[in-house]
Image (cartoon, helix red, strand yellow):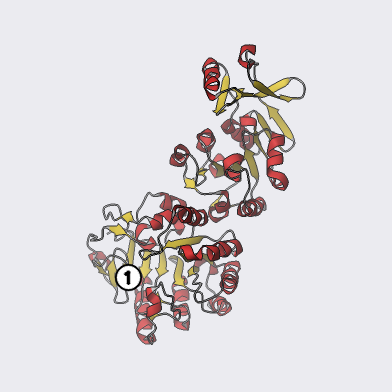
């Protein structure tokens, strides 16, 4: 039998104090048999207490459990087991956070082990009331994720929720399956800008038991002690009281239609980005030493604007992590583009890597002059350090075809060439974002394995290849997305990284 690392558990609870129109839990409003549910939790605890290997546990009640004292006690009791690394519970946060926190403290439990999967229900509570509870728990040391159903009718509410929520807390969007609320392209773009994993939920993954971790290192246990590969799989594989008797899992389903199902598929971008937090739907925050940002198309949108959420993320990150730029822009235009954000950056790589600036140090990579014949019939901009060192040319040609012609005459010489339409940028062969980034990290004693680099075009690929955490923005070129370990926007970075 495989070593079990993750367990979903559902007791006999079948009621909820919320009656949301879109939720099946809301239809279960009968009287709860608390005694039966407590017995189920006790049986589960007795079995888990006998385990030795490290475990992560996720409680997924059919309804709201944490409004009941016994449910909170059961959760805390499990967290006190030394081999339980973490325990979470799905909840609507209708309980009192202060009482829960006091109960954790009274049991001398490790609060960092306690996590929550919190869902916001706009039909039942206000944003401000919900956010206040989220932050009270989070600032007390309880990690949590926050979720909401992705109805296009609630887009404005979701935008406000994200704006008011601490930028380090992941807000996931559950796709509303079926019904008449069909999403348009702009709806999908909006939800993806909030939750970089939204498409994973919107496009159900194909079930594949040969690859699935369900029934191997992840199991679902119900109130009777029956074990299944996952909560959506009806095929029993054993009993929690006899782990040695587990049989090989099978799956009759064609699609994984919820997070708890498709998150069991290994070696996906979701699993790599979520890391150890995948069971709890809370991204694992990797420790980093620096972040390098491209500017155009990365920090800015297609209009050259930096969004408010991006500004807030940069400001938050700058409080704990050194930030650097890696841009095709020379330093002064970059400074103008970023405005009052520029002072948050420690330095960077400018002019396609021809100018490296850090801690008042400036290194320029000199460029040999291009033949005069290449300058005829075009506008030429020379970037000069001091009075002698030319480190970059930008040529504006009469046509894109002429730009390509000039590139062919220069491509075998000692130049880096970057073109866009009628513009051709020329730097020395040994200049580049990658080499500039490596120079700064070497001088500042920064381990490249602990560096984030984020960009949007293939021109950023060499820079991304040098670091431990290569990131592409959501609308980056496909070639960059294919090589990036993370696909997210700058305002998502606080969700995944910390100093």
**Residue 155 showing in the rendered view:** yes
Identified at 39% across, 83% down, the residue is 29
Identified at 48% across, 47% down, the residue is 487
Q: Is residue 221 above or below residue 265?
A: below
Left or right of residue 340: residue 447: left
Query: In the rendered image, which quarter contains the N terminus?
Result: bottom left
Q: Position of residue 2 (x, y in %)?
A: 30, 58
Q: In this view, does 485 lie above or below 242?
A: above
Q: Where is residue 474 in the image (x, y as percent from the top left)?
A: 50, 47
Q: Closer to the camera, 226 or 357?
A: 357
Furthest residue in direction right, as rendered: 387
Instruction: Judge the density around disc 1: few (<14), some (14-19), many (≥20) Cα neighbours within 10 Å.
Output: many
**Residue 281 showing in the rendered view:** no
Left or right of residue 180: residue 460: right
**How many marks can you see?**
1
* Residue behind mark 1: 221
Q: Which structural element holds mark 1?
A: strand
Q: Position of residue 368 (x, y in %)?
A: 64, 17
Left or right of residue 12: residue 277: right
Identified at 45% across, 37% down, the residue is 479
Q: In which quarter of the image is residue 417?
A: top right
Q: Position of residue 312 (x, y in %)?
A: 64, 54
Q: Is residue 276 above or below residue 331?
A: below
Q: In which quarter of the image is residue 350?
A: top right
Q: In this view, does 296 lie above or below 376?
A: below
């Amino acid at each position: 039998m495989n070593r079990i690392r993750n367990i979903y558990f559902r007791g006999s609870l079948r009621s909820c104090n919320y009656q949301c129109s879109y939720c099946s839990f809301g239809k279960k409003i009968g009287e709860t048999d608390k005694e039966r549910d407590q017995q189920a939790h006790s049986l589960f605890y007795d079995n888990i207490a006998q385990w030795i290997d490290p475990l992560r546990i996720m409680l997924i009640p059919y309804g709201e459990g944490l409004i009941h004292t016994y449910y909170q006690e059961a959760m805390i009791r499990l967290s006190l087991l030394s081999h339980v690394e973490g325990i979470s519970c799905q909840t609507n946060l209708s309980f009192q956070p202060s009482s829960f926190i006091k109960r954790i403290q009274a049991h001398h439990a490790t609060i960092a082990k306690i996590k929550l999967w919190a869902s916001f229900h706009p039909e039942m509570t206000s944003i401000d009331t919900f956010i206040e509870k989220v932050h009270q728990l989070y600032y007390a040391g309880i990690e949590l994720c926050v979720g909401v159903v992705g109805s296009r009718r609630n887009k404005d509410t979701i935008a406000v929720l994200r704006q008011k929520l601490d930028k380090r807390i992941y807000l996931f969007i559950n796709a509303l399956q079926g019904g008449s609320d069909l999403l348009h392209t702009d709806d999908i773009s909006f939800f993806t800008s909030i939750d970089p994993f939204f498409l994973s939920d919107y496009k159900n993954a194909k079930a594949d038991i040969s690859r699935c971790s369900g029934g191997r290192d992840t199991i679902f246990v119900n109130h009777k002690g029956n074990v299944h590969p996952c909560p959506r799989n009806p095929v029993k594989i054993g009993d929690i009281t006899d782990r040695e008797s587990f049989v090989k899992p099978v799956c009759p389903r064609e699609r994984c239609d919820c997070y708890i199902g498709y998150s069991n598929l290994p070696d996906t971008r979701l699993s790599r980005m979520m890391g150890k937090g995948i069971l709890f739907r809370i991204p694992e925050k990797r420790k980093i030493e620096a972040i390098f940002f491209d500017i155009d198309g990365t920090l800015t949108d297609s209009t050259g604007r930096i969004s408010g959420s991006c500004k807030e993320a940069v400001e938050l990150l700058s409080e704990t992590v050194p930030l650097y730029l890696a841009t095709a822009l020379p330093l002064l235009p970059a400074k103008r583009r970023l405005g009052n954000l520029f002072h948050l950056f420690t330095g960077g790589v400018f002019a396609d890597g021809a100018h490296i600036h850090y801690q008042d140090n400036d290194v320029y990579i000199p460029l040999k002059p291009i033949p005069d014949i290449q300058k005829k019939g075009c506008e030429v901009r020379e970037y000069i350090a001091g009075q002698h060192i030319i480190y970059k040319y930008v040529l504006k040609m009469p046509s894109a075809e002429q730009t390509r012609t000039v590139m062919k005459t220069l491509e075998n010489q000692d130049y880096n060439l970057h073109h866009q339409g009628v513009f051709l940028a020329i730097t020395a062969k040994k200049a580049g974002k990658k080499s500039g980034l490596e120079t700064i990290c070497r001088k500042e004693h920064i381990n490249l394995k602990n560096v984030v680099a984020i960009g949007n075009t293939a021109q950023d690929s060499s820079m991304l290849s040098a670091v431990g955490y290569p990131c592409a923005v959501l609308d980056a070129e496909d070639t960059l997305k294919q090589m990036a370990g993370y696909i997210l926007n700058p305002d998502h970075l606080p969700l995944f990284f910390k100093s």
